[in-house]
Image (cartoon, rainbow, N blue to C red):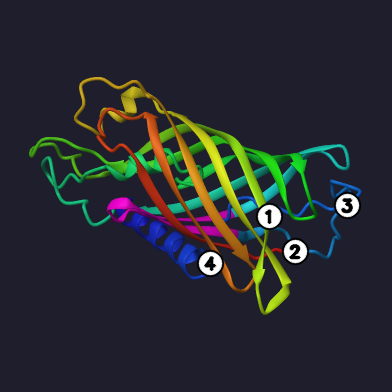
Amino acid sequence: MRSRKKALTGWIALMLIFPGLLSAQSLKPVAAGARRDTSPRSITEPPEWLSAGMMEWGQGGQLQASARVVRLMIGEPGKWQLPFSVYSGVAQPGSNASLAGGAGSRTNESITWQLYSPWSGMMNVGFEGQKLCSHWGPYSAIRLVFQVGERVLSGYRIGALNDPLAGRQQYLWNHYAVIGCVIHTGAWERSNPKNLGRGWIMVRGHLSYSAPDQLRGLFSVPKFRGLYGGASLGLGIEVSRVVHLRAGVCWPVYGPEWSLLRSLTQFSFQYNWKP
């Protein structure tokens, strides 16, 4: 069974690293006139399978590779709709994940970072979307953004030297919600103004919850709240076939008991196969 898990993890890593790296939702320019695409998709258009992804680097060497497996719309075509997405990913603990505790157990500090990244987890299922609040040009606007869902995080069980389960991979069920606003405008190369992209700044609040009983097997802390929150500030620039980068910092306002970090930094490279 353990060999099968390792093989599955290896295949997921290959799928994530070679096809591409989760895009935050596309911030489409504000069109004059109609604000919503109400036309049905052509039956010949391919489905959005593995159409977007992200490779995230966190402080301490943490690495998270995520891919959007599928994206669907739920609601009434032309009236209201809610984007439903499924993400899959793998996490690398980082260079500071040395052996500790006993019986080959490892540090789970990377879980702190995963709690505040809305695209983290071996499996991540939820709703994400945006709503136009105000605009002052075809490409400049402020939007409300949100993401809510369920995900499965992974860590390593801690224990004494004589504990046969110590050091083995353990899964953590996590509920999360993110809400905030983004201001975006146009971005382009000086020599090629026709290839118009966007630059943006985003402010968000983060909440996540995991059952304390599940956390006890991952950290040597006497008591857990289970509910954690924070705030983040992110910057990004996206120009097709040129650059697609973002960076951000998160402040754990109501952080986990096992971490003393006052801030979490993140740098990521994204892709999106669809315009």
If you read the primary sequence from the N terminus, does the residue marked by circle 1 or circle 4 appear first?
A: 4
Q: Amino acid at mark 3?
A: Ala
Task: Identify residue for label 2.
Answer: 46
Secondary structure under tag 1 reads strand
Q: Callout 1: 10 Å neighbours few (<14), some, many (20+)?
A: many
Task: Identify residue for label 4.
Answer: 20
Name the mark on residue 185.
Answer: 1
Q: Position of residue 89 (x, y in %)?
A: 46, 53
If you read the primary sequence from the N terminus, does the residue marked by circle 1 or circle 2 appear first?
A: 2
Write down the region rendered in magenta. Answer: 52-68
Q: Callout 2: 10 Å neighbours few (<14), some, many (20+)?
A: few
User: Height in image: 244 above or below 116?
Assistant: below
Mark toward the viewer: 2 or 3: 3
Q: Callout 3: 10 Å neighbours few (<14), some, many (20+)?
A: few
Secondary structure under tag 4 reads loop
* Residue 251 sits in quarter: top left
Please give the name of the residue rendered at 25% of the width and 20% of the height, measured from the top-left corner: 223
Secondary structure under tag 2 reads loop
Q: Position of residue 148 (x, y in %)?
A: 58, 34
User: Height in image: 14 above or below 75?
Assistant: below
